[in-house]
Amino acid sequence: MDEKIDRILISEDEIRDRVEQLAASISQDYQDRGPVVLIGVLKGSFIFLADLARRLTIPRVVEFIAVSSYEHGDTRSGAVRLIMDVRDSIEDKHVLIVEDIVDSGHTLHYLLDMLQSRRPASLKSCALLRKAERAEVDVTVDYVGFEIADEWVVGYGLDYSERGRTLPYIGVIAT
Ligand code: IMP
Ligand code: MG
């Protein structure tokens, strides 16, 4: 796998430091609020969520949700489909969506809309990466790890047709 990476964009150390900072801000913001329900968006968020969840110093619960946004490889359609829902009700709970990357914003927009209709006590979002210049819908991301340029990246949970997902760093793939 490594030989297919053009270059490393964000190193393992940089990711670790940033996740630590994000966990510290989130822990501070959610202090005295009761448990936060972390909803990881599968599959891309699984490694980020695992690291983030373990660094929080506040009570937390882990849930997962799965959506499909791209029908064919990385082709963009804007249509988001729910594939797997969370197990428990989020009504009156403090909910934080944990995403790998916000690209066009369609996925996060869909999730915020859908989860808000279930009347959580609060609803916020956290994404490890954001490609701001690709935004097609205006969506607030409360916690962003890194702003990146418009390039396809893999590693630390992110994939290109299932390739590169378990790399420890974020790299630009040679396509
Ligand atoms: P959006 O709906 O366009 O914001 O896309 C969000 C989803 O597209 C993310 O959760 C990823 O699964 C996927 N995605 C977008 N850009 C990349 C990338 O550069 N690498 C890997 N996955 C990506
Ligand atoms: Mg994703």
Image (cartoon, helix red, strand yellow):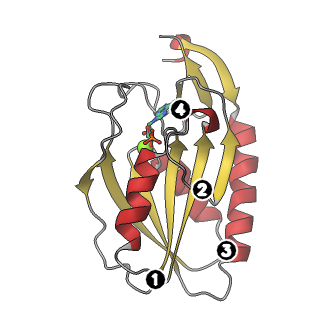
Q: On the image, numbered disc 3 is attached to which residue?
A: 57
Q: Secondary structure at mark 2?
A: loop
Helix, strand or loop status at disc 4: loop
> Contact, CB < 8 Å: mark 1 with mark 4?
no
- Which residue corresponds to mark 2? 141
Q: Residue at x 34, y 58 (%)?
A: 65
The residue pinned by badge 4 equals 155
What residue type is disc 3 on? Thr
Q: Is residue 76 left or right of residue 9?
A: left
Q: Residues within 10 Å of mark 1 (few under 14, many from 20)?
A: some
Tell me what residue is drawn at x 41 percent, y 48 percent: 107
Write down the residue under mark 1: 93
Q: Which tag, 3 or 4, sits closer to the chain's start?
A: 3
How far apart marks 3 and 1 lie (CA) works out to 18 Å
Q: Which numbered mark, 2 or 1, is in the foreground of this view?
A: 2
Compared to 138, does 75 lie above or below? above
Position of residue 88 in the picture relative to residue 16 (left or right): left
**Residue at position x 68%, y 26% in the image:** 9
**Residue 26: image location, x then y, percent:** 67, 68
Q: Disc 3, disc 2: CB below 8 Å?
A: no
Q: Position of residue 35 (x, y in %)?
A: 53, 82
